[in-house]
Amino acid sequence: MKVIDIAKTHFENLGVQSVEVEEWVDENNNPTIIYWDPITLAEKKKLFQKSDNLNDVAILADIVVMKAKDKDGKKMFSLEDKLALMHKVDSDVLSKVAVAMVQTPSVDELKKKS
């Protein structure tokens, strides 16, 4: 097997990721769970092209808008939500979610999923 095939298989096996956002509870006091597919290099390129400055924290909102899905795979946020995410949402929580979305899970995390 070629190395490229091994690398592609690894990426495919990452599967859907998720994070529980304890700060965002629904009417039944259940935390919001946000799902996403692992971020690709092409998606990272698109995000970085949107930002002239890699210190621009607006990229965190862009990541969440681009990647966040519900349990059924439907997008949770639209581009119209970006302004609210940037001005009316706890920046620490948004940062926690966005950082989780761009990190590759560890081997231990993947084993826990299995």
Image (spheres, helix red, strand yellow):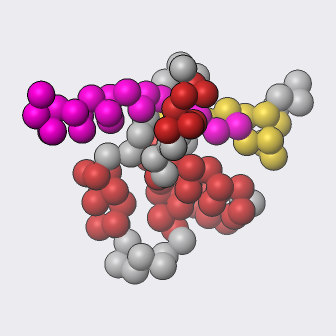
Residue 9 on the magenta segment? yes
Residue positioned 16% across, 32% down in the render: 5
Residue positioned 42% across, 76% down in the render: 54
Residue 70 visible (yes or no): no
Residue positioned 50% across, 43% down in the render: 105
- State whether residue 20 is above or below residue 13: below
Q: How many marks?
A: 0
Q: Quadrant of the C terminus?
A: top right
Residue positioned 82% across, 36% down in the render: 25
The span shown in magenta is 1-20
Towards the viewer: 92 or 9 = 9
Instruction: From the viewer's perspective, tell me whether residue 3 is left or right of residue 19.
Output: left
From the top left corner, tell me how far across and down residue 3 is, in percent. Answer: 15, 39
Instruction: From the viewer's perspective, tell me whether residue 23 is left or right of residue 32.
Output: right
From the top left corner, tell me how far across and down residue 8 is, in percent. Answer: 23, 34
- State whether residue 55 is above or below residue 12: below
Towards the viewer: 53 or 10 = 10
Instruction: From the viewer's perspective, tell me whether residue 1 is left or right of residue 9.
Output: left
Residue 22 visible (yes or no): yes
Q: Main secondary structure of the magenta part?
A: helix
Q: Quadrant of the N terminus?
A: top left
Residue 8 on the magenta segment? yes
- State whether residue 27 is above or below residue 107: above
Quarter location, residue 46: bottom left
